Amino acid sequence: MRVLVTGAAGFIGFHVAKALLARGIEVLGVDDCNAYYDVRLKRARLALLGKDARFEFHLLDIADHAALSRLGDGVAVVVHVAAQAGVRYSLEQPFAYAASNMTGHLSVLELVRHSPRIEHLIYASSSSVYGTGSALPYGESARADQPSSLYAATKRADELMSHSYTHLFGLKQTGLRFFTVYGPWGRPDMAYFGFAEAIMAGAPVTLYDKGRLKRDFTYVDDIIAGIMGVFDHPPGDSQPHRLFNIGNNRSEYVTDLLRLLEVGLGKKAVTVTLPKPDADPVETWADISALAALTGYQPQTSLSEGIPRFVEWYLGWRAVRGEK
């Protein structure tokens, strides 16, 4: 079997590719390796994946459909996790989100549509589609028509495009709404990574709303277990396009995460507080019962276990960067 993984140099894509290779599956990875965050980190992920002869990599932008369309031969499944990430960055660079998240997603849909051997498209959505008005915990049937950021709007648009392609062309698809993924090899723009960088530099850590925000923090290994569960349970004809939450099924204070980072790094954070940005929800919390019923998905890693694992990796990555 051959699987195409978009965003293979990214945080989740890297871990997906590793899991597939561990099963002996050939992985065709694509990524444009843009400079949204430290490209050294993306290259280091690719270097690890490249140690396996079953990994093949193509440097390309998924929005370039002519280039992407040449990669469909022999592919049985597509795991599409490439995207322009970040809620607040969408306020600064809106067209990057339209190109990567919407044109890019459409390009992947067209690839699958015209590659009859592709049996299943698994794609990344986001908990941000729920906006700020849904009741907790978020269930897949909750309304998702009031996005509070452009990023959220693009991810909801992806879900709707996928729905239409299944209706029109019979594509078998699974969309996964990720909830605040963290862990080793993570993204520097995420709060936990940024907090660690600030603590080590003695710079202020920004807490919104005095640290009262809560998130459903989900360790990356649990996310990968959920993705592989969906991989092993493709859609049938009765429900060819499915949407699932994939999270930790608990909501925890951002300050709890900060405290664990302080303990792991052996340094106290200097904090400042600002009002909550309009694009940010007060709390997120995933109802994962639907995914559990299908795949047996059950997160195994608490925040108190996952953050020390991240810290161990992070200190090693600082050493690679030549920092103490």
Image (cartoon, rainbow, N blue to C red):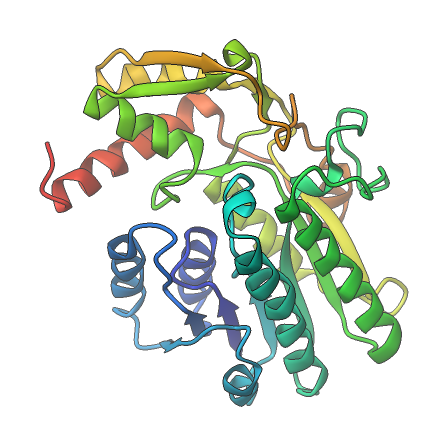
Question: Which residue is painted at 50% across and 44% down in the image?
Answer: 89
Percent from the top left, x then y, of residue 130?
A: 74, 38
Q: Quadrant of residue 194?
A: top left
Percent from the top left, x then y, of residue 40?
A: 24, 55
Q: Which image quadrant: the C terminus?
A: top left
Check the image and report above or below for 80 versus 304. below
Check the image and report above or below for 281 versus 86. above
Question: Which residue is painted at 27% across and 30% down in the image?
Answer: 197
Q: Quick check: can you spot residue 245?
A: yes
Q: Quick check: can you spot residue 81?
A: no
Percent from the top left, x then y, of residue 247?
A: 62, 37
Q: Quadrant of residue 114?
A: bottom right
Give the left or right position of residue 179, taking residue 258 as reference: right
Of 228 and 111, nearer the camera is 111
Percent from the top left, x then y, of residue 144?
A: 80, 42
Give the left or right position of residue 59, taking residue 265 as reference: right
Question: Which residue is painted at 66% across and 86% down in the image?
Answer: 117
Check the image and report above or below for 41 versus 303. below
